[in-house]
Amino acid sequence: MPTQVRARCQSCQAATRRPAPLAAAAALGSELDGRPLAATAAVTASWRWTCGGCGLVTPSLEAARFAVESGRPATGLRLALQAAWIADDHDREAAPPCREAAAWLARRAGGQDALLADLHRRNGELDAALAAAHRVLDAWPDPRLAALARHQLELVAAGDTGRHSMVDLFARTAGEAI
């Protein structure tokens, strides 16, 4: 793996060389919001960089905003999620606004209720999490999504706003008729 990569700033479009971000193997599974389980605090810290031209930090809410303004809402959603994951590890008070922005973008993308349920639950917005989980149950015949939605309902009922693994969920439900 290269030690340096070229990155393009969301704001000023300047090309910058930066240390290569550490990989987080998606094959190992993810949390309910899509964060790879392999994305440790050291890995998430390596994802963040600052543009040498304008000083924009990426990923961040500001970088997500620039992506949306540039007509790339999916990139904005990814940046807001990554900013939330980084904040979970390094600045917990900054995580809720990142998840709020990701939820706003996910709502506009449509069909993101499974993600919305987790983002809202993690932020303590339990009524919104319940509504999103119920929309998943009402709209998706996929038994795995139904299991995910039922799990979110259980977590909401318990007042649980913590991080949870998809691997643990599916291991727990593997023996059940889903």
Image (cartoon, grey):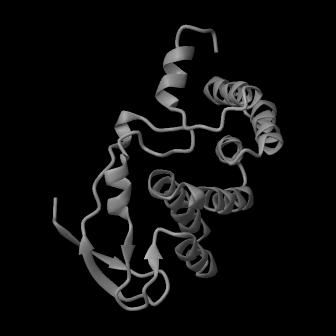
Q: Position of residue 110 (x, y in %)?
A: 72, 54
The quarter of the picture where residue 99 lies is bottom right
Image point (72%, 26%), residue name: 158
Q: What residue is rendered at 56% in x and 76% in y?
A: 62
Residue drawn at (36%, 34%) of the image: 28
Quarter of the C terminus within the rendering = top right
Q: How many marks?
A: 0
Direction left: furthest residue: 2
Where residue 20 appears, as percent x and y from the top left, is: 24, 65
Taking 44 as reference, is 100 left or right?
right
Looking at the picture, tell me which residue is in the foreground, 75 or 141.
Answer: 75
The part of the image, by quadrant, that contains residue 126 is top right
- In this view, the residue in front, 151 or 41, is 41
Residue 147: image quadrant is top right
* Quadrant placement of the N terminus: bottom left
Q: Is residue 139 left or right of residue 72?
A: right
Q: Find residue 112 and report its horizontal and vertical position in percent.
A: 68, 48
Is the residue 146 above or below the residue 31 in the image?
A: above
Residue situated in front as seen by the camera: 120 or 106: 120
Which one is in front, 152 or 91?
Answer: 91
